[in-house]
């Protein structure tokens, strides 16, 4: 359970992100314990949080990284991750990003289209290099998550359509500057049941068998990320059930001899260790509602405004045991700048500190300066 060092908080300018180092380390240990196989490789999806201090711990744990931009590759390299553990995904890799990735000899490009494959081939040939590529397949699987964060359906922009896979594989076989190492998948994020991962395993088995019959063997399968966290009960479930997650692959995915299995976990590694700490500016009585107006806004944590996500809100300093019911809102000039409606909190007053929990993933990294606001700081304990 995360404990908040309130004495220390008193002198820190709000809003800021607070990260529980102990929980992060315990989460990383739980992942390692649940996936001891030498052929299982976890790459941290750095898009979830690229705070250098967070990266330091994940790097020390020996994980690889999943990047989607030159900036992310640079952040990973600066944090000490070896290039040999970096995979590079994304539907719109620019020429200069591909150039940078080739120069740095990253482990693999997760390629999302035929034109991208052609460009990587041309650029690698110009440098007399051989680029390792995995083809990102759009497996057309419904992950039953928010439609903004589902990625594996036919209508999504991600990956190569199953029907075009033969053509992409044939293309790779003809190009000396490309080495096709495997297939890549990612079906969505904040997936709360394991069933979609089982369906993914079945789909992968079918594909691997199909290509094996044609004499094509893959040395790497990358199943992406997506494991969800319990936003309602961060203290009861601080560490996701990694054992059951890896068991799904252990039980359902047929790993051929020598095949390596890669995972790209983001949210499940960092969400629960982070909280956004914010101060109550005003408690405003409306005709129908009481508003708690805090100094953090959608600029600091956009998930509620963007995905209608709900993060548990906790009053860390109320002196009261009786409760009140409040809408907790930020200072930004948008109605969607709201962290919670009809929240039951201990009676809340100006100056109280609130923790908006489970904000370690897609929180600080998605902060903006809209309304010319300063970016939130970060504190580790
Ligand atoms: N691999 C690929 C190719 C991805 O696109 C993503 C996330 C991941 C791995 C990591 O997925 P995770 O394990 O974190 O679910 N901003 C949204 C989430 C967007 C996820 C995008 N892709 C949110 O705040 O919910």
Image (cartoon, helix red, strand yellow):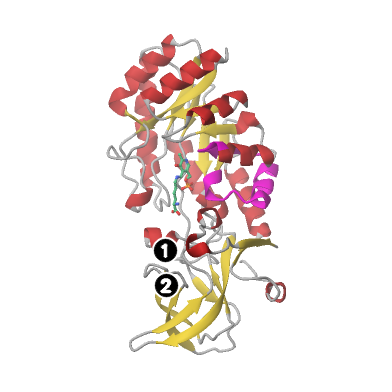
Q: Position of residue 2 (x, y in %)?
A: 62, 66
| Magenta-highlighted residues | 46-70
- Give the residue pinned by disc 1: 304
Snapshot quadrant of residue 325: bottom left
Q: Position of residue 302 (x, y in %)?
A: 45, 60
Of residue 205 and residue 2, the one placed in the foreground of this image is: 2
Q: CA distance from mark 1 to mark 2?
A: 8 Å
Snapshot quadrant of residue 111: top left
Tell me what residue is drawn at x 57 percent, y 28 percent. Answer: 101
Crowd tier of the residue under label 2, counting other residues whose Cα lies within 10 Å: few below 14, some 14–19, many 20 or above: many
Q: Earlier in the sequence, mark 1 or mark 2?
A: 1
Q: How many marks?
A: 2
Q: Secondary structure at mark 2?
A: strand
Q: Residue 133 magenta-drawn?
A: no
Tell me what residue is drawn at x 53 percent, y 66 percent. Answer: 357
Q: Position of residue 56 (x, y in %)?
A: 69, 47
Crowd tier of the residue under label 1, counting other residues whose Cα lies within 10 Å: few below 14, some 14–19, many 20 or above: some
Left or right: where 145 falls relative to 379: left
Residue 256 visible in the shown view: no
Snapshot quadrant of residue 135: top left
Tell me what residue is drawn at x 56 percent, y 50 percent. Answer: 49
Confirm or deny contact between disc 1 and disc 2 (CB under 8 A): yes
């Amino acid at each position: 359970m995360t404990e908040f060092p309130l004495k220390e908080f008193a002198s820190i300018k709000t809003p800021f992100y607070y990260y529980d180092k102990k929980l992060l380390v315990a989460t990383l240990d739980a992942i390692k314990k649940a996936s001891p196989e030498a052929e299982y490789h976890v790459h941290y999806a750095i898009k979830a949080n690229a705070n250098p201090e967070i990266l330091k711990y994940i790097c020390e744990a020996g994980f690889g990284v999943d990047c989607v931009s030159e900036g992310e590759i640079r952040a990973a390299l600066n944090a000490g991750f070896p290039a040999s553990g970096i995979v590079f995904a994304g539907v719109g890799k620019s020429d200069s990003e591909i150039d940078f990735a080739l120069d740095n000899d990253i482990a693999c490009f997760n390629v999302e289209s035929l034109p991208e494959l052609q460009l990587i081939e041309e650029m690698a040939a110009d440098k007399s290099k051989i680029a390792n590529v995995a083809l990102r397949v759009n497996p057309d699987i419904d992950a039953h998550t928010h439609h903004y964060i589902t990625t594996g359906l036919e209508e999504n922009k991600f990956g190569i359509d199953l029907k075009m896979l033969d053509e992409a594989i044939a293309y790779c076989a003809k190009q000396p500057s490309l080495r096709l190492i495997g297939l890549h998948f990612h079906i969505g994020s904040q997936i709360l049941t394991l069933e979609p991962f089982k369906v993914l395993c079945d789909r992968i088995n079918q594909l691997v068998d199909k290509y094996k019959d044609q004499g094509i063997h893959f040395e790497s399968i990358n199943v992406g990320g997506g494991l969800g966290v319990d936003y309602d009960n961060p203290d009861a479930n601080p560490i996701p059930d990694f054992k059951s997650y890896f068991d799904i692959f252990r039980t359902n995915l047929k790993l051929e001899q020598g095949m390596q299995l890669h995972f790209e976990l983001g949210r499940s590694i960092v969400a629960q260790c982070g909280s956004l700490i914010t101060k109550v500016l005003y408690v405003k009585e409306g005709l129908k509602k009481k508003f708690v107006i805090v100094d953090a806004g959608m600029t600091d944590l956009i998930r509620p405004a963007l995905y209608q996500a709900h993060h548990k809100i906790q009053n860390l300093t109320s002196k009261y045991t009786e409760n009140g019911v409040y809408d907790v809102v930020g200072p930004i000039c948008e109605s969607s700048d709201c962290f919670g409606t009809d929240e039951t909190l201990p009676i809340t007053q100006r100056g109280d500190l609130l923790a908006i929990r489970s904000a370690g993933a897609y929180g600080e990294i998605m902060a903006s300066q809209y309304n010319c606001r300063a970016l939130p700081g970060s504190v580790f304990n």
